[in-house]
């Protein structure tokens, strides 16, 4: 499971970008995407976050910020999904102005498909729309522990529910408009629940085909609006063959989706503390 922290790759990036005499053109050639993935700030932390951008990211020539927003924005399309401490449209514009001035591109992120719960808490989407739950028979525990008999890491929404995309695509469009973004990050990492046998819509279906279909559906929606889809890459790696296991790769056979998804999708490879050649 992923945790917060500064990856070694980012430290190497910071070192490389701090080398005296390295021209901008040379840097762009060596590392065209110099990014950081981080949670969006709350309103009370916005000013300090902008200071972080100006004093830490800009001097190191970071040019891409994957900003995990999730429900930390005051959505007008679905106000029922807004978190308690959510950024307003005006606060987002303040952040966008700061990143533009620093030469940083924002790629906003909302976790789609997986990561619809954490520990003992159901995420906003399934809390408000429980009918979207891929595994409604799996109850959230009072005290979370791993491993557990349900194999519960995080909940997923059912990609075949007829109403789920009406909701999530409205959120995606609104967040991309707010951040003036030409790309969107859908997460889609560590999806353990997909194509469950007891799901009346997904039961018996190929998990790789289900995953690929969801990726392509999101990609097509974004492409129609001139935007690119970014996702994490772990579900496209075979955890059995590579020995990478269930967190950094797939043990439920979604890896075959790599040959089914659009080549226009930007795949963000990640690993814990080591640069596996995947």
Image (cartoon, helix red, strand yellow):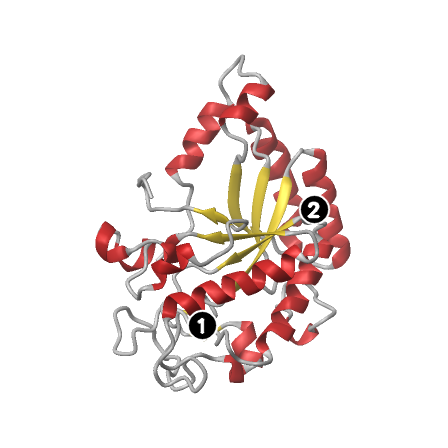
Quick check: can you spot residue 121?
yes
Which residue was labeled with disc 2? 95
Q: Quadrant of residue 72?
A: bottom right
Please tell me whether mark 2 sits on a helix, a strand or a loop.
helix
> Is residue 28 rendered to the left or right of residue 258?
right
- Is 116 situated left or right of 101 in this image? left
Q: If the image is split into quadrants, where does the N terminus sit? A: bottom left
Residue at position x 64%, y 34% from top? 54
Instruction: Identify the residue under disc 1.
Output: 156
Residue 213 point in image, percent of width and height = 49, 66
213, 13: nearer the viewer: 213
Q: Position of residue 140 (x, y in %)?
A: 39, 80
Q: Is residue 254 above or below residue 234?
A: below
Give the answer, above or below, for where 52 lies relative to 260. above
- Where is residue 20 drawn, in percent x and y? 52, 14
Q: Is 28 placed above or below 149 here?
A: above
């Amino acid at each position: 499971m992923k945790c917060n922290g500064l990856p070694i790759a980012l430290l190497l990036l910071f070192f490389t970008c701090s080398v005296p005499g390295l021209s901008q053109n040379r840097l762009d050639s060596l590392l065209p995407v110099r990014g950081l993935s981080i949670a969006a700030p709350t309103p009370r932390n916005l000013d300090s976050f902008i200071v972080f951008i100006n004093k830490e990211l800009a001097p190191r020539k970071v040019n891409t910020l994957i900003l995990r927003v999730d429900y930390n924005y005051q959505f007008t399309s679905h106000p029922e999904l807004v978190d308690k401490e959510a950024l307003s449209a005006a606060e987002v514009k303040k952040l966008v102005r700061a990143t533009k001035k620093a030469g940083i591109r924002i790629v906003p992120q909302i976790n789609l498909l997986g990561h619809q719960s954490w520990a003992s808490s159901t995420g906003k989407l399934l809390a408000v729309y429980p009918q979207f739950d891929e595994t409604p028979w799996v109850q959230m525990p009072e005290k979370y522990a791993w491993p557990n008999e349900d194999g519960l890491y995080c909940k997923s929404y059912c990609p075949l529910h007829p109403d789920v995309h009406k909701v999530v695509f409205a959120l995606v469009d609104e967040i991309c408009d707010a951040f003036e973004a030409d790309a969107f990050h859908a997460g889609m990492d560590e999806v353990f629940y997909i194509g469950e046998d007891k799901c009346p819509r997904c039961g018996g279906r190929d998990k790789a085909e289900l995953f690929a279909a969801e990726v392509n559906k999101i990609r097509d929606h974004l492409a129609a609006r001139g935007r690119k889809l970014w996702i994490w890459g772990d579900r496209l790696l075979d955890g059995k063959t590579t020995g990478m296991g269930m967190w950094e790769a797939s043990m439920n056979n979604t890896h075959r989706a790599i040959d089914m998804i659009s080549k226009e999708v930007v795949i963000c490879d990640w690993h814990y503390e080591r640069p596996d050649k995947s």
